[in-house]
Image (tube, grey):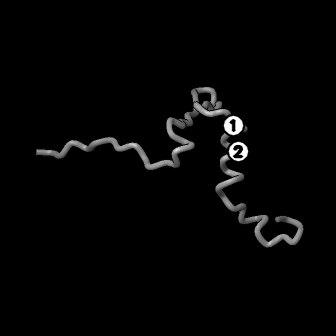
């Protein structure tokens, strides 16, 4: 017998629960979350590798 694979949802931050991103047939990105809200989350939680060694950044 073959084992049935259970499709598990990935573990995500509580602020991103329900977030889905898809690309439609026209190549447009469709998201369940406002892009500004997503950018704010990323700015708070992810360090930008390109900017980490700059002297003029916090």
Q: Do the residues labelled 2 and 1 touch (CB within 8 Å)?
A: yes
Residue 51, quarter of the rendered image: bottom right
| Name of the residue lying farthest toward the right | 56
Disc 2 crowd, CA 10 A, few/some/many (<14, 14-19, 20+): few
Query: Picture coordinates of residue 37 (x, y %)?
Result: 68, 39
Asked if residue 47 is positioned above or below residue 24 in the image, the reply reads below
Residue at 79% across / 72% down in the picture? 53
**Which numbered tag is attached to residue 39?**
2
Q: Which of 12 and 26 is in front in this view?
A: 12
Query: Picture coordinates of residue 46 (x, y %)?
Result: 66, 58
Residue at 76% across / 65% down in the picture? 50
| Name of the residue lying farthest toward the front | 14
| Name of the residue lying farthest toward the left | 1
Q: Distance between the residues labelled 2 and 1?
A: 6 Å
Q: Quadrant of the N terminus?
A: top left
Residue at 84% across / 70% down in the picture? 54
| Left/right of residue 15 with respect to residue 34 in the rendered view | left
**Which numbered tag is attached to residue 47?**
none
Query: Picture coordinates of residue 4 (x, y %)?
Result: 21, 42
> Circle 2 — which element?
helix
**Which numbered tag is attached to residue 35?**
1
Disc 1 crowd, CA 10 A, few/some/many (<14, 14-19, 20+): few
| Left/right of residue 43 with respect to residue 23 in the rendered view | right
> Circle 1 — which element?
helix
């Amino acid at each position: 017998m073959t084992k049935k694979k259970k499709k598990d949802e990935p573990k995500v931050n509580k602020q991103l629960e329900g977030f889905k991103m898809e690309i439609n047939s026209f190549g447009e990105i469709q998201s369940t979350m406002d892009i500004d809200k997503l950018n704010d989350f990323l700015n708070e939680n992810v360090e930008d590798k390109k900017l980490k060694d700059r002297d003029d950044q916090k």
